[in-house]
Each structure stands twice: as C-alpha cells, then as structure tokens.
Amino acid sequence: MIRLLGAPFAALGRGSTTLAEGVGRWGMLTGQTIQALRHVDVWLRLLLPQMARVGVDSVPIALFIAMFTGIVLALQASYTFTGAIPLYFVGVLVGKTMMLELGPVLTGLALSGRVGANIAAELGTMRVTEQIDALETLAYPPVAYLVVPRVLAAIIMFPVVTALAIGMGIFAGWATSIQLLDMTSAEFINGLTLFFVPFDVTFAMIKATSFGFMVASIGCFFGFTTEGGAEGVGHSTTRAVVVSSMVILVLDAFWAVTLL
Amino acid sequence: MKRSNEAMVGVVILAALILVTFGTLWLQGVTLRADEREVTAAFNRVGLIKAGNAVKLRGVRIGRIREIQVAPQGDLVEVTMRIQEDISLPDDAVAIVSPESLFGDWQIEIASRDHFPEHRYANPREPDHLPGYSIPDISQLTATADRISADIEVLTERVGIAFSEETARNIASLIENVENVTQRLSDLISQQADAFSGVTEEIQVIAEEVGYAATGARQSFERINQTLAREEFSQALSDMTEVTASLRQITREMEGTPEDIRGMAVKADSTFARINSIMAGLEAGEGTLGRLLEDPTMAQEMEGTLQELQLLLSDIRENPRRYLRLSIF
Amino acid sequence: MAIQIRDLYKSFGEKEVLRGFSVEAREGETLVILGGSGSGKSVTLKHVVGLLTPDSGDVVVDGQVVSELTSNELFKLRRRVGYVFQFAALFDSLSVAENVGMGLRRHSDMSQDEIRDRVTECLEVVDLEGFEERFPAELSGGQKKRAGIARAIATRPQYLLYDEPTTGLDPVTRAMIDQLILRMSEELGVTGIVITHDIDSAFRVADRFAMLHEGRCRFVGSPEEIRSTEDPVVRGFIEGRPELMEKAQ
C-alpha cells in the first residue's frame, strides 16, 4: 500500500534527478567546450564548413518561413485593425513582431529542427559507430573537433540567418500591404519607423545568438550521450529537437523578462 | 566545393551585416549623406523626445535629433540635431518640442519666433543655440487645469476678504468678459457640431449642455451685475464660488473619464474659456486684484499654464481628428 | 616497452564487467585475448588508450599509468598506439585518404606531400591502392576494416590494438588480415593485442594467449599450452563445446 502510494512520488523524484543529471552533464559538456576552445588548430579548419551547413543551408527554409509569416502578419493586422486603428499600424505590428519575436523564435525553432536534429543524428551515429572513440585514439580532442565548430558556427550563423529572416518578413509584410491592403509604401514605412529603436535589433540578435548556442550545444549533448545503435540515434535526435525547442521558448520568455 | 562554401558563407554573412547596419540606420532615419550640419537648441524640459526623432521645418522633415543632454549647470537641456546642410533656418528660429502624433512619437519643429510669440522660450547659454520650448502633453494639461481651479478658489476666497468698491468694478468688467467668452464658446461648439455632425451625436448633446451652462452662467452674471449695483457683494461672491465649483467638477471629470475625450475636449474648452475670461478680468484690474494675492508669482504662473491650455485648445480646434482618434482605444 | 593490465575493475551501472583482470603484453609479441561476446574484451582494450577509466586497478603502457596521465600526456601516448576498431569506425564525411591521414595531420610535422606518400604506402600495405578518393559508404565491410588498419598504422605506432579484426569477414579477407597482423609484428616489431573469438585467426597470429572469463584472467599461455590445457572453460571455448563450459560452472 505504502509502495503504491509512493510510486508517483518516486517517479517524480526519478524524473527530477534525471533532469538534474542531464542539466549537469550538459553543463559539463559546455565547460569542456569552453576549455576546448584552446585547441584552435583543431576546430578552426572545421568552422567554415559547419558555418556553411548551419547557416547557408538554413537560409532558404528560414526565408520561406519568414516570408509567409510577414504576409500573414500584415493580413491579420489589417483584419484586426479594420476601421478602428490607422492602417499604418500594420507597419508597426509587422516590424515589431518580426524583430522582437517571430523572426528570432521561428528561425530558432526551424533551425532546432534542422540543425539540432542534424547535429544530434550525426554525432549520435559517430558515437555508436565508435567514430568518436576513433577520434580520441588519433589524439584529436573530440569536443574540440566536433562540438566547438558546431557551437561556434551556430552562435555566428543563427543571428545572420535571423537577420535575413527578419528582413524577409518585413519585406513580405510591406509587399502584402501595398499589394493587397491599399496601403502606400510611405504609410507602411511610417509605421515601421514609428516606434523603432535600435535596441530592437540588438534584442533580436541577442536572442538569436542564445538560441544558436542552445540548439547546437543541446544537439551535441544528445549526440555525444547516444547509446544503443540506430534506435538510440533516433531517440537522441527526437530529444534534441524537443528539448531545444522548449529551451528556445523558455529563453525567449527569459530575455523578455530580463531585457525588455 | 570548399571554395564555393567559403564564398557562400561570406556572401550570407555580408548580406546579413549590410541588412542589419543599413536597415537600422534607415529605420532610425539616418542618412549617410555628409552634407548635414548640427544645430543645438536649449530647452527647460524636452517632453518625450529621444534621439532619432524627426526635426521638421514647416511640417517637412529636415533632419533628426542626435543627442539630448542636460547642460552641466543643470538648468537647461541641450538637444543636438542634424539637419540638411542646404536648408537655412529663420533668423529668429526657435525650436518647439511637440507630439508628432498621439501614439508616443515626438518631434522638434523649427519655426520663426514671430509665429509663436506666446511661448516662454528657454534662454540658451550659447548665442548660436536656438531658444526652445516644449508643448506640454494632455496629461500635464489636466493636472494644470486642476491646479488652476484650486488657485481660483483661493483667489475667490481672498476676494471675499478684501472686497472694495474698486474691485467690484473690476469684477463687473470681468463678468462682462466671461459673457463674451461664453458666447464665443457656444459659437465654437456649434461650429464643431456642424463639422462633425455626421461623426457624433454626443457632441451635439454636449453642446446643448454647455449651452445650458452658458445660459445659467449668464443669468448668474446678470444677477451679479444687479447685486453689484445694489452693492450686495456677498451674493456676488457666492456666484463666483459656484463658477469655481463647476470648474472643479469638470476638471475632475477630465481626470476620471479619459475614454470620453470628445466630451472632455468640449467641456475643457468651455472651462478654459471661463478661466481665460477671469484671468482677463484680473489683468483688466491692473493688478488691483492681483495685489490680493499673497504670492505675486502665482498670477504669473497661472498665466503661463493658461497659455499652455489655450495652445492645446487651439490645437484641438485645428486638428480635432487627432484627438477624436483617441476615443477609439 | 610493454602493456601491463593490473587488477582491472570496471562496472557499468549494476553490471560488473571486469573484476580483477590482469594480463601483460610483452614487447614485440602479439597477445590474443580470447573471450565470449560481452566478456569485457573491448572494454579492456579501451582502457589501454584511456577511452575508459578503470574503477580500480591500472593499465601501464611504457611505464606510464594511463589513468593518471594529463590530457596532453594521454594524447602523446595515443600517438604511439594504433587502434583498429571492430567496425573500422571510419569518419563518414572524409575520404579514405583523409581518414588514413587523419592522425598524421594532427601530430606530425609532415608536409602535405609526405602525408600523401605515407597514406599511399599504408593503403598499399592493406591492398587498397586506388581507393584514396572513395568514401567509407562506398566500401565493403572488409575494405572498411582494412582502411581502418591503414589508419591505425599510418602513424607508425609501437603498439597496435585490434578489436575483433576478422569478425564478419570472408575467409580470404580474414587470412589477409591475419597476415597483416603478423607482418606488423615481424617487420615493424609492433607490440600487439588482438581481441577475438575467431579461434582459427587467433592461432595464426598469437604469440601468447589470454582468456578473459567472468571478468578475470582464466588462462595465460603459449599456443602449445592452450592446446594442451585441461581447463574445461578454455577447452570448451576453443573447441566450441559449450557443454564443457557449463560443466565447469
């Protein structure tokens, strides 16, 4: 009876310790990543290809998402503002929302699926096929070889992709406004500039950078800790995407609370 | 393969950098043209302007605010603006801070002093700095109206203490002015009602109400006139207090019901008109009544705030749509 | 110049894999460690290069205790040890030549040309000349394994560790890999540890045998000694007679 009653608590306890252990091990990997930065000779060569994979290859999907977000934002804003609020507020809404929220977050989420999953699957496969062990036996520090270039590439390229996505979203909003909403370009731009402060851009870049770091390091973490063959790789990949998506949303709220 | 990778990474990063840099500058209204010059203006206070806001001449944007600093002495705010090189400013140029719209963005308008002589401009320390003046926003005006009504109450009390034949004559002329203003006010309201008859029935209702009030006021003023002739000053005084009370009530309403700005604007108009006339009466008394005030600066202060109120009113009259829009929220 | 494994303990969670395993690979010899699947052979081998740290006990290579080395010393040690993984563990994203040259690029002052020559040479040794530009996905299992050996020997190590080098290969390839192991030992004087459960192959390459059973060393001796041993577990294993092993339990 006591055991029966205790079961949910035991499950809760196990859950929390597993979470705490995971966070701790992720923290250790992050610490190792920072230490591994000193092996410049190892990771520097690998940074550029990773930047191409993380950044350049993600540009189309990010632009695609941002374009439709911009269109929908403009249409929905005009729908909401019908008659009551001057239409140039469409520009305010598109600009602010793209910069502060949707640009960084949607790009982050899209890239957590694309980049985070890719990293977790790749490193997971390398783990279960002993390629990571092989790296060590060839005297390569695996964190410097595998984690550092991916994390750095994500830190550098997430803001880049996000900036392009924001530009695309605003452009799409503008195009929608003047084509479908009977607004003039000047009205839209007036709205766009009305409440703009340079900090909006800084805020977006801070968010994107932190998302990049989290997505890459979480992907690396789940890849590195993969166990048990192909099934394990699939498991790691799923968890990397789920966890990094959740972390993005939590971080998003965190930045909104601390920086705004 | 590798070479093109490098090139693509470079292109993407460069595109993002250009986008961020030029996008930010563009949205801030910064032009990269070198043919700009700096102009500095001195203000006592600067409202809600911030760096990047528009600087306008005759309603046209000619530059932006670059920097806002309190002078080391702490008595002035010095605002540096960058404006187009090729535009020459009026010789007696002044800088006026005002809201660009009601949505929180402010601007500096550069104008000739001749056009707005009524403002009390700050005195710049440097000869090449423009004198500046900041138009108060609507919330400040509400507070000011409240203060004025309190002042008038005090004034009325003091009038009761030291009433004389001479001051009675002054009050008579003051009441005459009040009548004039009341008439002007009802004219104005009927004009407004015409202009926006399609927009609102409320205004008409309010106009009627104010009309009643005006009639009532005129009646009471006539009584004052009669009583003054019979030298029954105490009755006149109580009428005076009545006016003040209605003024106070309107002010309270202004603070209490911001959603009904249309009504507020109209009521405020009439109230301010009354205050105006009372003040005019004060002036007409050549300081006789003014001497009744313990603090001689009180009258000056009231005059200043009254000017501000009048400015708002004239703005409401000229751009009623700007204020009507508020009621939408 | 030898590898000594002394009283090694290692468990993963509840599971005790090594319980006091001791064995020595003397300089220049090829030691074959026999043992069933899951008996801890690979775990032992990973301790030698510091991929795993023992719960207790030591692995001593060249007089250095592996688990006590700093990461730099460990990297230096690893340059002298070649590791042949069970499934080759080639890097999927790199060509065969890049895979083989990997260790050289990391820690030698060899020029690009010298590295290319060495890679070609190593690929010739394992009979893979002409495969430089192929990617691992384009290789068969045997070819991958040989490429893995080429990678392990490219740095001219003093020690070679083979993790089941012949498992899952056809007889011809197996024979070829056995010859390779012998050549390494005879021509280059490499000290080798081969872990396997392929008895034929074991007898072809072994100078000495050790048998890992239930986490401990059950038997150490020469090929002649293992053939004549009376230990039912060892006999059962090499003759493929489980009933003997069961009887011994």
Image: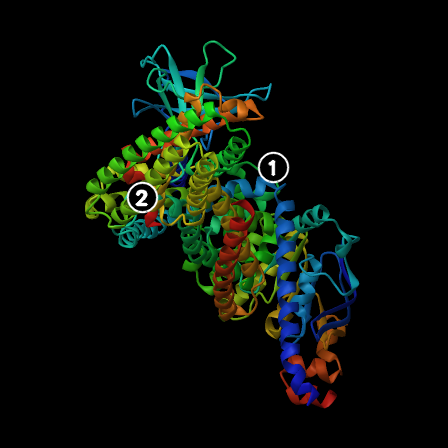
User: Above or below — where is B262 with respect to B225?
Assistant: below
Residue B37's x, y, as percent? 40, 15
Number of on-image labels: 2
Left or right relative to C18: residue A240: left
Residue B65's x, y, as percent? 42, 25
Q: Compare residues A192 and C122 and report the one nearer the observer.
A: A192
Instruction: Kindly identify which chain the residue marked by label 2 belongs to.
Output: B
Q: Quadrant of residue B190?
A: top left
Q: Which residue is mark 1?
A: C109
Q: How has the structure been colored for display? A: rainbow
User: Above or below — where is C14 with respect to A152?
Assistant: below
Tags 1 and 2 both on a single chain: no
Three-letter code, disc 2: Val
**In 3D space, how far apart are the residues under numbered discs 1 and 2 (Cα atoms)?**
97 Å
Three-letter code, disc 1: Asp
Q: Quadrant of residue B207?
A: top left
How many C-alpha atoms fall within 10 Å of the one at disc 2: few (<14), some, or many (≥20)?
many
**SS at mark 1?**
loop
**Quarter holding the N terminus of chain B?**
top left
> Is residue C109 at least partly visible in the picture?
yes
Residue B124's x, y, as percent? 49, 15
Q: Which residue is mark 2?
A: B210
> Is residue A94 at least partly visible in the picture?
no
Residue A175's x, y, as percent? 24, 44
The disc at residue B261 is none
Q: Compare residues C207 and A155 and report the one nearer the observer.
A: A155
Instruction: Kindly identify which chain the residue marked by label 1 belongs to.
Output: C
Q: Compare residues B125 and B117 and report the one nearer the observer.
A: B117
How many C-alpha atoms fall within 10 Å of the one at disc 1: few (<14), some, or many (≥20)?
few
**SS at mark 2?**
helix
